[in-house]
Amino acid sequence: MDPAVLAWLQAQLGTATDPADLQARYTRLGAAKAIALEVLGERRARLLADPLQLTVNGVVTLDQSNNLTGLERQIASVEAATAPDDTTDGTELVVAPLRRAHRWHR
């Protein structure tokens, strides 16, 4: 993962996101956008694991609904964005080793 990809990921996910974790995910997934979507999906899942709203009458009200809405907007934004390692012309770069051609004699 090059510095441009790391900077883009931290811009999407926050600078507190562990670069070593991002590198491990990049090795596994191979694309910055896939990493950002995976991390944001995990954050969304954590929010949904607990009640979004909690009210103790007359004491406190906690509401995580806006956080969920914000995460869903951020996911949509990342899906629409172009990451530094995205191909822009719809083609995929493939690296293949070259071998010396064999000459056949008759």
Image (cartoon, rainbow, N blue to C red):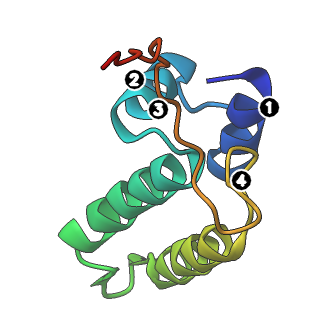
Tell me, yes or no, if residue 50 can be seen here: no
Q: Quadrant of the N terminus?
A: top right
Say which element carries label 3.
helix
Q: Which mark is residue 24?
A: 2
- Image coordinates for residue 3, horizontal then vertical, percent: 77, 22
Q: Quadrant of residue 38?
A: bottom left
- Give the Cα distance between marks 3 and 1: 13 Å
- Give the Cα distance between marks 2 and 4: 18 Å
94 on left or right of 24: right
Q: Give yes or no for contact between labels 4 and 3 (Cβ–Cβ under 8 Å).
A: no
Circle 4: is it few (<14), some (14-19), or many (20+) Cα within 10 Å?
A: some
- Amino acid type, label 1: Ala
Say which element carries label 1.
helix
- Image coordinates for residue 60, horizontal then vertical, percent: 41, 75
Residue identified by numbered label 3? 26
User: Could you say which is closer to the camera, residue 85 or residue 76?
Assistant: 85
User: Could you say which is closer to the camera, residue 46 or residue 94?
Assistant: 94
- Amino acid type, label 4: Ala
Labels 3 and 1: the sequence-earlier one: 1
- Amino acid type, label 2: Ala
Q: Give yes or no for contact between labels 2 and 4 (Cβ–Cβ under 8 Å).
A: no
Q: Give yes or no for contact between labels 3 and 2 (Cβ–Cβ under 8 Å).
A: yes
Labels 1 and 2: the sequence-earlier one: 1
Residue identified by numbered label 1? 4
Say which element carries label 4.
loop
Labels 1 and 4: the sequence-earlier one: 1
Q: Which mark is residue 83?
A: 4
Tell me, yes or no, if residue 46 can be seen here: yes
